[in-house]
Amino acid sequence: MFKLNSKTQDSLLFYILRFISLLVIFLLLFIIFILFKSAWPSISQNGIGFIFKTEWNPVEQHFGALAFIFGTLITSFLALLIATPVSIFVALFISEYLPKSASRILSLLVEMVAAIPSIVFGLFGIFYLAPMVRDSFSPFLKTYLGFLPFFQGPSFGIGILTASLILAIMIIPTVTSICRSVFELIPKHQKEAAYALGSTKFEMIKLAVLSPSISGISSAVVLGLGRALGETMAVTMLIGNSPNITKSIFAPAATMASVMANEYTDANNPQHVASLCYLALLLFLITFLSNLFAKSIVKNFSKMG
C-alpha cells in the first residue's frame, strides 16, 4: 500500500488548507462582484445620493436607502442593548454559579434556542410578543418615560420595539455561548488569587472574570450584531415594513433585509431590482465595517491586557 512520509503529508496538508482558505476569499470577492454588477444600473443613476434619500417609490422609480439603513441600525442596536447584559448574566450564572452537571444541561437548552427557525420566532412575535408590547410594555413605558420622544405616539404592537425584542431573543444564545466559553477559559488560579486577597464572589467575578474577558465579550457582541443586521423573516413579520424615519420606537419601520424579502420576487423593473441589489451591497458594507470596528476594539483591549 502506498504510504506518504511525514514531510510529504505536512506539505500536502499545507497546500490543501491554503487552497480552501483562498477558495473562501475568492467566494467573498465573487459575491461582492455579483452584487456590484447587479447594482450597477442603480449606482450609475443614483450615485452616493442613494444612501441619503428617504423616498422609496418603485412605481415612480424613486429609490432611497436612508429609511432602511435607519431601520436596520436602530433595531440591531436596540437588540444588542437588550441582549448583551442578559447574555453576560446568563453566561456568568452558568459558568460561575451552577454545578457542572446542571450547567451542561442549561447550556444545551440555551444553545437549542439558536436552532429555532426564524419563521417560528416571527410567529411567536405576532401571536404573543406583539400583543404584549401593545397592551403591557407600551403603556408602562409611556407612563414613566413618555416625556421622551422615543416613547411617544400610538402603539399597535408591530414596530421597531417588537422587532428589536425578537432580535434580542434570537441573538442571546449566540452571545451567551461565546461569553460562557470565554469565562470558562479563565485560569482557576486567577480566581483563587482574587479570593486570597479577600474578594467576595462579586468582586472576584468583576476582577478575575469580566476584566480579562472584555475582548472575548466584544467578539461575542459583534457576532450577535452580525446576526441582527442580516435577520430577515422574523423582522419582516414584526417591524411593520413602513419606509419611514421616526423618533418613536413604537412606530413601524423597515430594514434593508425586510424590504429585499418583501419586494425582490415582485420587482419587474430593472431599476427596482438594481436598487434592491444596491441595498444588499450596502448591507454587506455595513456588516463588514462593523466587524472591522469590533476587531480594532478587541485589538486595543488585547494590547491593554
Image (tube, rainbow, N blue to C red):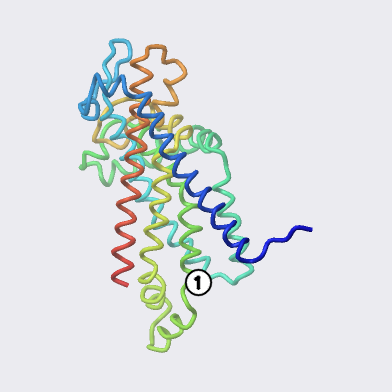
Residue at (38% x, 46% y) in the render: 79
Quadrant in the picture for the N terminus: bottom right
Residue 176 at x, y percent in the picture: 48, 57
Question: Could you say where residue 15 lies in the image, as x and y percent from the top left?
Answer: 54, 53
Q: Quadrant of residue 206?
A: bottom left
Q: Amino acid at mark 1?
A: Glu
* Residue ID at (27%, 24%): 43
Q: Secondary structure at mark 1?
A: helix
Q: Residues within 10 Å of mark 1 (few under 14, many from 20)?
A: some
Q: Classify 59 as above or below 251.
A: above
Where is residue 139 drawn, in percent x and y? 34, 39
The residue nearer to you, when weighing 165 against 117, is 117
- The image quadrant of residue 74 is top left
Q: Which residue is mark 1?
A: 96
Direction from residue 223 to residue 249 in the image, left or right: left
Quadrant of the image containing the C terminus: bottom left
- Residue, x 39% and y 40% (percent of image)? 229
Disc tally is 1
Q: Residue at x 42, y 20 (%)?
A: 263
* In the rendered image, the vertical position of residue 210 relative to residue 260, given as above or below: below
Horizontal side of 30 relative to 251 (left or right) equals right
Q: Nearer the viewer, residue 301 or 195?
A: 301
Quadrant in the picture for residue 108:
bottom right
